[in-house]
Amino acid sequence: MKLLLDLGNTRLKWAIAAADGWSARGAVAWEEDVSTALVQAWQGLGRPDRVLGASVVDTSREKQIEALAADVFARGVVWVRTPAEACGVRNAYAEPQRLGVDRFLAMVAAHAAGHAPCVLAGIGTALTLDALTEEGQHLGGLIAPGPWLMQQSLLGATARVRPEQAGAIRDIADNTADAVVSGCWQAVAALIERFAAHMADQHAERTPRLLLDGGDAAALLPLLRVPADIAADSVLRGLLVWADSHPVPASP
């Protein structure tokens, strides 16, 4: 039994991996009382053999989670850091550690599941795009603000764009609230479509599959004009592949 941790910008997702899949799972936003929520969720789950984590947050939050894992399970956390190559995936970055570990593990999960060649779109606080060949070669990617961060940036940098009510996503808007929301979400959708089309042009023999993950993936899916699938829990699934590929050395 393994406890897998995905420390994202907005929330922490976790899952207990057993032989038949997730036996327990959950998520908590950083703006909540993380310690209390996790202690309540983890008590009574049994002691995992290993605790593995992927993090894109600061060291202080990692230390907080390490302390909780030690208190509840008497286990340390093994933090997976982005390598140059692992689990059949080769990192395109000249400085491998600068690629977010969440992006690398999403590619690991996709490759292990037989989804490559593929384009992976992570739609959360940031929008991340990565291209992966059938052979596991990462070709590179793009990073942009996610739809909500884009809206916040627009409202924070303008004096008169101040909608008084929540907007809705429309093809064309006749009020400011809808225009802001629609413009930001459609901009994200358009960038994903453009990136996917570029990758398809480069691989005419087999069109890369488009996979979406992240907190806003389901909301974005209907806006796309190209085929796409939700690949939920890609970081956690990548962590599980990593764990199986990096067993704990046997004691002498």
Image (cartoon, rainbow, N blue to C red):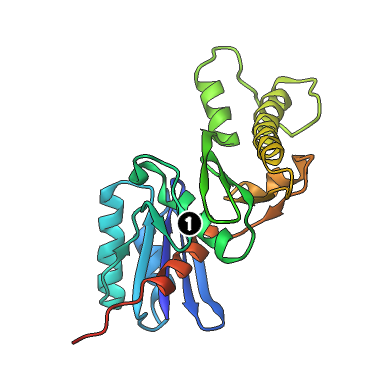
Please give left or right for residue 97 compared with residue 174 in the image: left
Which quadrant is the N terminus positioned in? bottom left
Residue 47, percent across and down? 35, 82
Whether 236 is drawn above or below 210: the answer is below
Whether 138 is drawn above or below 20: the answer is above
Residue 205, percent across and down? 74, 48
Point 30% across, 75% down: residue: 72
* Outermost residue toward the top in this view: 159
Point 37% across, 51% down: residue: 84
Residues 144 and 176: in front is: 144
10 Å neighbourhood of mark 1: few (<14), some, or many (≥20)? many
**Disc 1 marks which amino acid?**
Val
Residues 60 and 205: in front is: 205
Point 43% across, 74% down: residue: 244
Please give left or right for residue 201 compared with residue 64 in the image: right
Point 37% across, 39% down: residue: 94
Judging from the image, what secondary structure is the residue with disc 1 in? Answer: strand
Please give left or right for residue 223 compared with residue 37 in the image: right
Whether 134 is drawn above or below 145: the answer is below
Could you tell me if residue 252 is visible in this image?
A: yes
Residues 247 and 36: in front is: 247
* Outermost residue toward the bottom in this view: 252
Residues 240 and 72: in front is: 240
Whether 143 is drawn above or below 246: the answer is above
Residue 201, percent across and down? 71, 37
The quarter holding residue 187 reads top right
* Outermost residue toward the left in this view: 252
Judging by the rendered image, the residue that carries numbered circle 1 is 89
